[in-house]
Amino acid sequence: MTAPSTAQHPTDEALLARVLTPYKDHCKYLRSAVVTEAGGRARAHCEFAIPESCYIDDTGHLNSVEVNICYNQMMYYLVAKSVKDGLGTGFPDWTLDDFFTHQLPDILIARFASNFRRPVNPRAFSGQMDFGSVTRRAPAGGSPFLRAETVFRYWDADSGRCDGEATLAIVNIP
């Protein structure tokens, strides 16, 4: 049995800049994102740097607020790149205009859990996010939405490690 082929998509600098537009300059932590697709699933491998926390004195390690901000940036880029290049199976009818219309008001984190295994250096670290599934739901009497199951992890050069899971609800879908 052969492994599914993997297509690799390097960082699209213009797309990354547009995805990060809603963030204040000192909160743009995502530096690069290489997206791969295999077996109909998209994955982002990212590089981050947090020169200075946007809300607290230096803790010396990646903290839960920064984990969430980095997750958002990684997820937004992965969705935008998936839409732009037709990757994965979750957003086949979306355009980039659809993504940017829905980016902030309609992509909700319904559940978020992170586990800190070893402190991660916030000045330079890597991250990875995978879409496990993206399914369309239509609750009785409710509007349809997309439910996306994701997993993520962060690590640094000194064996720092954090991982977690998040469930997205994407509402008001086109």
Image (tube, helix red, strand yellow):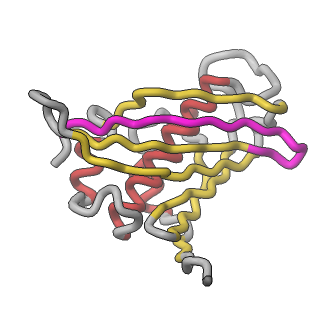
Magenta stretch, residue numbers: 155-172
Residue 68 location (% of width, % of height): 56, 30
Is residue 115 shown above or below 41? above
> In the picture provided, is 105 more to the left or to the right than 43?
left
Farthest residue, direction front? 1
Residue 24 location (% of width, % of height): 48, 33
Q: Quadrant of residue 108?
A: top left
- Residue at image position (63%, 51%) is 128
Is residue 119 shown above or below 83? above
Q: Quadrant of residue 173?
A: top left
**Who is closer to the viewer here, 144 or 66?**
144
> In the picture provided, is 134 more to the left or to the right than 29?
left
- Residue at image position (61%, 83%) is 2
- On whether residue 168 falls in the magenta region, the answer is yes
Residue 137 location (% of width, % of height): 24, 41
Is residue 95 shown above or below 146? below
- Residue at image position (46%, 27%) is 111
**Who is closer to the viewer here, 11 or 42?**
42
